[in-house]
Amino acid sequence: MSAEIIDGKAAAATLRARVGELAAGFAADTGRKPGLAVVLVGEDAASAVYVRSKGKATVAAGMASFEHRLPADTAQEDLLALVDRLNADDAVDGILVQLPLPEGLDADAVLQRIDPDKDVDGFHPVNAGRLATGLNGFVPCTPLGCLMLLKERLGDLSGLNAVVIGRSNIVGKPMAALLTQASCTVTVAHSRTRNLAHHLAGADIVVAAVGRANFVSGDWIKPGACVIDVGINRTDDGLVGDVDFASAASVAGAITPVPGGVGPMTIACLLRNTLVAAHRRAGVALAADAI
Ligand SMILES: Nc1nc2c(c(=O)[nH]1)N[C@@H](CN(C=O)c1ccc(C(=O)N[C@@H](CCC(=O)O)C(=O)O)cc1)CN2
C-alpha cells in the first residue's frame, strides 16, 4: 500500500485565502482591519523565521501586523509591561509571544498575562480550560491544523481509534481534547508508555508529537491509518518528522510529510484565530461554519 500524501501547504493556502476574504468583510463592516501583535524576544534563528512568516502572512490576509522585537536580556517586568500595553490596545485583537523564550524568562507567567480573549495561540490556562470543558475559546494552532487535515481526509471522525504520542500543553493535550470532542476513542501515549506498538496496532489515527526524529516506525502502523506528523527535527539528513516517513508511507492510508504537512497549517490557523478574535471583540457575528 502506498499512502496518500496530505498536502498541508495547499490546505493552508486555501484557509489563508478564506481568512483573507472574511478579513476584508470585517474591515468593510467595522472600518478597521483585524490586528495581530507578535512578540519575539532574543535571536533564536528558527523563531525569527517563524515570526517573519507570521508577519508576512498576516499582511497578505489583509490584517494589521504589529511586530515587537526585544533583546535576549529583556527583564521579565519589561516583557510583562509590553503584554499589558498590547492587552489594552484596541487595534490589537490577537497577541502571540513566540516560544521558546530565552533562559531566565518565565514563559508561563508571560502567557498567563495575555488577555484570554486575545490569546490567539490558545496557550492561556483559561483557554485550555475552555477547550477541556467544550466552551468556546481559542484552540492552539498546531493541533487545530491537525484536526482540519484529519477532517479533510476522513470526514466524520466519530468512533475512530486515535493515538496521540506526546502530552505537551501545546500539542498533545489539546489534540487529545479535540479528538475526544470529535467522538474518537483517544489514547495519549508518551515517553513512559509501555509497548507503544501494541497501542498503535489498533489506531485509525496517529498524531506523533514526541520531538524525536523518526521515532515511529512503519511496522507499528495499522494498514490504512491516517498519520499526522507534528515533529520538526533538524538532522544531518535535513528536516525530518517524528515518524519514519518511508516505512510509514508504505503502510498508512494517508500521511503528512515534513516539511509541507502540519507546519504550514500552524500559521494559517493563527490567522483564523485572529479573525475570530476580531469578530468576538467587535461583537460582529461570524457563522460557526464560516471557517
Ligand atoms: N507562540 C508560539 N510559539 C511557537 C509555536 C506556536 O504555535 N506559537 N509553534 C512553533 C513554531 N511555529 C510557529 O510559531 C512554526 C513551526 C513550523 C512551521 C512550519 O511551517 N514549518 C515548515 C518547515 C519550516 C522549516 O524549514 O523550518 C513545515 O513544517 O513545512 C510554522 C510555524 C514553536 N513556537
Image (cartoon, rainbow, N blue to C red):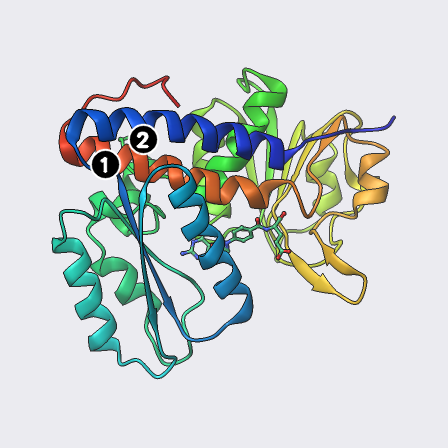
Q: Is residue 159 above or below residue 65?
A: above
Residue 270 in the image: state x and y as whole percent. Answer: 40, 42
Residue 234 in the image: state x and y as whole percent. Answer: 69, 63
Check the picture and name the quadrant holding the C terminus: top left
Tell us which disc is closer to us: 2 or 1.
2
Q: Please indicate, yes or no, whether residue 92 appears anywhere in the rendered image.
A: yes
Q: Is residue 263 left or right of residue 65?
A: right
Identified by mark 1, the residue type is Ala
Q: Is residue 113 left or right of residue 257?
A: left
Callout 2 secondary element: helix
Q: Which residue is mark 1?
A: 278
Q: Please indicate, yes or no, whether residue 138 appears anywhere in the rendered image.
A: no
**Toward the viewer: 44 or 34?**
34
**How packed is label 1: few (under 14 Cα within 10 Å), some, or many (20 or more)?**
many
- At a point 31% along the width and 28% down the height, the residue shown is 24
Q: Is mark 2 within 8 Å of ligand 1?
A: no
Q: Mark 1 and mark 2 in contact (Cβ < 8 Å)?
A: yes
- At a point 68% along the width and 51% down the height, the residue shown is 194
Residue 246 in the image: state x and y as whole percent. Answer: 85, 43
Q: How many marks?
A: 2
Dot 2 or dot 1, earlier in sequence: 2
**Toward the viewer: 64 or 138?**
64
Q: Which residue is mark 2?
A: 23
Per the model, the C-alpha gap separating discs 2 and 1 is: 9 Å
Identified by mark 2, the residue type is Ala
The quadrant where residue 279 appears: top left
Callout 1 secondary element: helix
Residue 53 in the image: state x and y as whole percent. Answer: 49, 52
Q: Is residue 189 left or right of residue 121?
A: right
**How packed is label 2: few (under 14 Cα within 10 Å), some, or many (20 or more)?**
many
Check the picture and name the quadrant holding the N terminus: top right
**Toward the viewer: 87 or 170?**
87
